[in-house]
Image: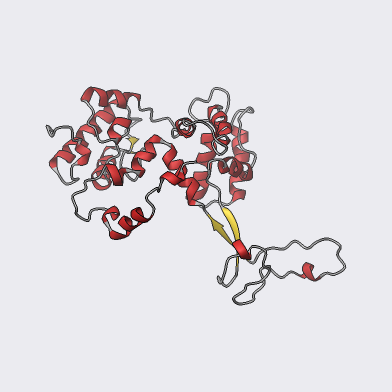
Amino acid sequence: MDKGNKGWWEFPRWSDVYEQGTDEYIEKAFATRCQGNQISCPCCTCHYRYWYDRNDVRDHIICNGFVPRNDESFHLRRMSPEREAEDLQHDEPSNVNYGIEELLYNALREGPNEEAKKFLNLIEEGQQELYSGCKKMSRLAFTIRLYIYKCDYKLPDVAIAGLLEFFKEVLPDDAMLPTSMHEAKKLLKLLGLDYKKIDACPNDCMLYWAEHANATSCHVCGTSRWKSKESDQNDNSNEKPRRIPSKVLRYFPIKKRLQRLYMCAETASYMTWHKYGRENDGLLRHPADGQAWINFDKKYPSFPMNLVM
């Protein structure tokens, strides 16, 4: 593969160079960091999160593309064989913290402002062992993994509460487990992964937001904002009735999620690949080549710099 400084993963996936590079990578990976007969899959879909055997990993790389792991290759510079072998040897497959400490320290590299100070507690959490002697997972990593598990399998909070009770029985007494899913969500809220609740008309006419935040009925169809309950009609009760909205919209703010992606050097390289990493030959190869994307860049030239906290 004497193709200058171009890495094999930059060639078309149907080319002989790409196939040869895939085979060489798999041989080195299984020789240095396999667990049993599996390695973490480096394809664009799995992104080192899931483990497969040799044939499945090869199929994934050929079909989905390859994600270089080290910082140099993110900038599309070719590694030497010695450096690549060294990186594979130090690429710990059991690092289930998913680079949490690196993400948090990257977030603070420009100095802590008011928003970044909230991450200081997370750094401390990320360094705490789940229980004494546990080197594979921190308390924060366990909480994130548990929440991903809940979302992937659509488990209710009561099921997670049952799992936590079970974990308390089998893990050491000093295990720092969240007491409930509510406590876990409070911890994850500092990561910017929370959502906002906005009351909505049950007929989807409007949101009770901005100038309509205090309205009690829909200004389009006149439907009440609240669910009707018999207790609300009880005039003998001295307690203020608890009003339950008829419909609630859960809004996931995108700004904080984009900020988290740009905070980490690793993910930031992916966020800017369409600008600095892809081939720009005037052909329509990527949505960034489309007129809508071009018009957006002209209208908002400071994006994403205006996301910096």
Q: Position of residue 245 (x, y in %)?
A: 66, 64
Q: Is residue 209 visible?
A: no
- Name the outermost residue toward the left: 2
Q: Left or right: 12 with respect to 47? A: left
Residue visible at 38% across and 40% down?
Answer: 268
Q: Position of residue 218 (x, y in %)?
A: 63, 72
- Name the outermost residue toward the bottom: 221
Q: Quadrant of the N terminus?
A: top left
Residue visible at 27% across and 42% down?
Answer: 277
Residue visible at 34% across and 46% down?
Answer: 45
Of residues 223 and 179, which is closer to you in this image? Answer: 223
Q: Is residue 27 visible?
A: yes
Q: Position of residue 87 (x, y in %)?
A: 31, 26
Within the image, what quadrant is residue 208 found in? Answer: bottom right
Examine the rendered structure and indicate whether residue 238 appears above or below residue 150: below
Q: Left or right: 106 with respect to 4? A: right
Examine the rendered structure and indicate whether residue 134 appears above or below residue 182: above
Q: Left or right: 21 with respect to 234? A: left
Q: How is the image coloured?
A: secondary structure
Within the image, what quadrant is residue 26 found in? Answer: top left
Residue visible at 38% across and 27% down?
Answer: 92
